[in-house]
Image (cartoon, grey):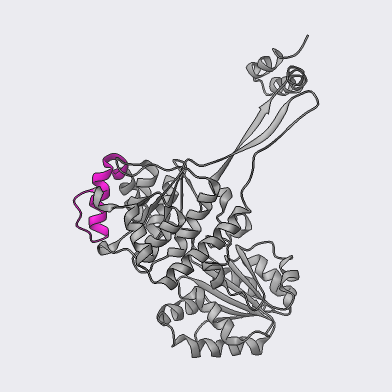
Amino acid sequence: METTWLNAQDADFDAKLAALTAWSEERDEEVADRVRGILRDVAKRGDAALVEYTNRFDRRDVAGMDELVVGHDQLQAALDRIPAEQRQALEAAAERVRRYHEKQKQDSWQYRETDGTLLGQQVTPLDRAGIYVPGGKAAYPSSVLMNALPAKVAGVGEIIMVSPAPDGEINDMVLAAAAIAGVDKLFTLGGAQAVAALAYGSDTVPAVDKIVGPGNIYVAEAKRQVFGKVGIDMIAGPSEILVVCDGKTDPDWIAMDLFSQAEHDEEAQAILVSPDGDFLQQVAESMEKLAVTLERETIIRTSMKNRGAMIQVQDLQQAIALANTIASEHLELSIDDAEQWAKQIRHAGAIFLGRHTPEALGDYCAGPNHVLPTSATARFSSPLGVYDFQKRSSLIGCSPEGASELAKIASPLARGESLTAHARSAEYRIKK
C-alpha cells in the first residue's frame, strides 16, 4: 500500500514530519462568505430561511418547520423498532459513557477565613446546549451519546439536537440514541443553517448557550463565526491515529487499527511508529492484504497515500518523544508496560493502553468521550466532558473586618492604576 516511509535518524526527518502532519488552517474565503450570508439570513428571517435552506441543501420539500421537528414519540418508536442487538448495544454503551462522565462532575466549594470572609466557587450547568450530529453519508449514533450524555450528567436544563435528513431520511439508530440519551428536542436541520438556528434561535428552534459536535467544512466555519454569541467545543480537523508498537503485536491487528481512522475520510491521518523495521514491513503487507476486504478501500488508500506514514525510530523512548511532538487525537501504545510508558505522554487526546485496546473501543463504548482535540491541539485542550457544560462563578463575601483589611491592599493598587473610584469604593469600607 502506498504511504510515506520515514526514518527518525535521517537529517531531514523533522522537516518531513512537519510537512506530513501539517493541517492547513487557511480558511476557504468562498466558504466563509457563503456561511456568513446563511448566518445573517437565518438571524433575520428565522424559520422561513431554515425551511428554504433545508429544501435546497438537503433535497427536501417541506412547507414549514413543523415537518422538521422530530417528536418524542418518533424517537421512542425508533428505539422500539431497531433490532434488539442494536438496542442492547446502545443502552450498554450509554450506561458506560454516563458512568465515566459522572466522575467528571465538579461540585461547588467555599471556605471562610478567620475574619469571617467567605470565598469559594459556585458551579452551575448551562441552561441550554445544542448538539450537532452529522447525517448524510454516514450515521453516528455514537456521537449522539458522546455529546448529549455529558450535558445530561452536568445537569443542562435542555438539550437541543440538530441532524440533517437528506432526502427526508434519518437513521433509526440516531433517533434511538437520542431517546436513550434524553435529548429534549430534535430538528432535522443540517449545515450552517442548523448552527445559525442554535446560535440565534427562531420561532421554532430555541437559542442555546453552547454548540458541540462535529460537522463538515460549512458546520466548522459556522461554529467559528458564531463563537462569542455562543460557546463552542472546538474546531475539529480530520481524524487521526498514532500507533506506537514494539513489534510484538499481530501485524493484522495494527493494520486494522490504522484503517479504523483512515476509513473516516481521505484527509484522515494514520501513522505507525516502531523501532522494528521488519515489523513495519509486516504491517505494510497486512495492510495490502486486508484493505481489499473493506468497503471503504478507496478512501483508505487515498488517506494512507496522502497523509499516512510508517516511521522507524531508534527505540521506544524516541517513539514516546515523537508522540508528544505529534500530539495526536488518538494514541495507541501497543507495547509492553504501556501504563508506565503512558506516564511520559504529555500531549494526546486519548491514550489507549496495551495490545488489546484498539481505538475503536473508545469510539463506541469504553466510556471516555470520543470528541477529542485534533491537529496537535491536544497540546492545550482536552476531550469533551462534563466540564464543558458547567460554569464556575467566584464567590466573595467580606465581613466588615475582612473588607477593611482587603481595602488597605486594594486602595494603593487602585491608585497606582489611577482608578480613583476603585480606590475610594474600597476605602469607604476601612474601619476607622
**Total numbered badges shown on the rendered structure:** 0
Please give left or right for residue 407 compared with residue 68 in the image. Answer: right
Q: Is residue 257 above or below residue 156?
A: below
x, y percent for residue 27: 43, 56
| Relative to 334, residue 26 above or below | above
Magenta span: chief secondary structure: helix
151 to the left or right of 167: right
Q: Is residue 184 visible?
A: yes
Residue 378, given in percent of the width and then of the height, sits at 60, 59
Magenta-colored stretch includes residue 46: yes
Residue at x 74%, y 20% (from the top left corner): 412
Where residue 284 appears, as percent x and y from the top left, is 56, 87
Residue extending farthest to the top is 432
Span highlighted in magenta in the image: 41-64
Residue 381 point in image, percent of width and height? 60, 54
Q: Is residue 183 magenta?
A: no
Q: Nearer the viewer, residue 51 or 5?
A: 51
Quadrant in the picture for residue 99: bottom right
As rendered, which of 106 and 380 lies closer to the eye?
106
Looking at this rendering, what residue extends furthest in the right direction?
A: 114
Left or right of residue 381: residue 176: left
Residue 235 visible? The answer is: no
Q: Residue at x 43, y 70 (%)?
A: 86
Quadrant for the C terminus, please.
top right
* Vertical arrangement, residue 162 with respect to residue 45, above or below: below
Give the left or right position of residue 381, taking residue 410 as reference. left
Q: Residue at x 70, y 19 (%)?
A: 415
